[in-house]
């Protein structure tokens, strides 16, 4: 867990991956709860006496957003038009990233700039977990159905 942002990650086979919302079983039977992309302090964490405060965000915003933000593009890709693929496994994590990006932009006062999470969404756009929704943009799809 990054102590500044409280974003939990797991490293497996040399790859670092974000832990998504939910309860995660750790080695030794311990559990870690993640909500809105951040670790929720449990009794064990609090008993360690570690300081626990609001996450600290990077002080400098990134480059300008060109059109849709990276996380908006990710949500559009995996959740589909009008949320057509909202039940897809990658849709909820994509929305979590978008919420985190918006929160960072709000805190920094720079809604038109990319953030730390924007960079994670750029990576996610290339990640095999975030599969593109194959639903059609509208019901009037002019392509033939194949049943001539």
Image: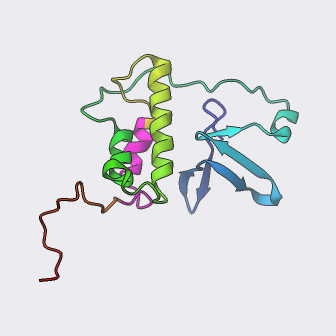
Report if residue 129 lies within the magenta region: yes
Q: For this view, does 39 lie left or right of residue 135?
A: right
Quarter of the view holding residue 53 = top right
Q: Nearer the viewer, residue 6 or 85?
A: 85
Q: For this view, does 17 lie left or right of residue 146?
A: right
Report if residue 52 lies within the magenta region: no
Look at the image and tell me whether residue 40 can be seen.
Answer: yes
The residue under the point 77% across, 59% down is 27
Q: Residue furthest right?
A: 47
Q: Nearer the viewer, residue 101 or 14?
A: 101
Q: Is residue 56 above or below residue 8?
A: above
Q: Position of residue 83 (x, y in %)?
A: 38, 50
The residue under the point 80% across, 30% down is 50
Q: Position of residue 113 (x, y in %)?
A: 35, 25
Q: Position of residue 38 (x, y in %)?
A: 63, 38
Look at the image and tell me whether residue 59 can be seen.
Answer: no
**Figure label count:** 0
Q: Which quadrant does the C terminus fall into?
A: bottom left
Q: Nearer the viewer, residue 31 or 62?
A: 31
Specify the segment rendered in magenta. 118-131
Q: Nearer the viewer, residue 2 or 30?
A: 30
The residue under the point 50% across, 49% down is 93
Q: Position of residue 1 (x, y in %)?
A: 66, 41
Q: Residue furthest bottom?
A: 148
Q: For this view, does 25 lie left or right of residue 116?
A: right
The residue under the point 40% across, 48% down is 123
């Amino acid at each position: 867990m990054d102590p500044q942002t409280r974003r939990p990650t797991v490293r497996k086979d040399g790859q670092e991956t974000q832990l998504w919302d939910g309860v995660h079983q750790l080695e030794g039977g311990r559990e870690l709860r993640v909500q809105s992309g951040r670790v929720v302090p449990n009794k064990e964490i609090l008993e360690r006496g570690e300081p626990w405060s609001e996450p600290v965000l990077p002080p400098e915003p990134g480059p300008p957003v060109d059109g849709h933000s990276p996380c908006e593009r990710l949500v559009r890709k995996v959740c589909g038009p009008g949320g057509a693929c909202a039940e897809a496994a990658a849709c909820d994590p994509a929305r979590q990233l978008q919420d985190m990006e918006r929160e960072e932009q709000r805190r920094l006062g720079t809604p038109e700039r990319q953030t730390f999470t924007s960079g994670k969404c750029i990576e996610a756009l290339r990640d095999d977990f975030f599969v593109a929704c194959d639903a059609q943009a509208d019901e009037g799809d002019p392509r033939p159905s194949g049943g001539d």
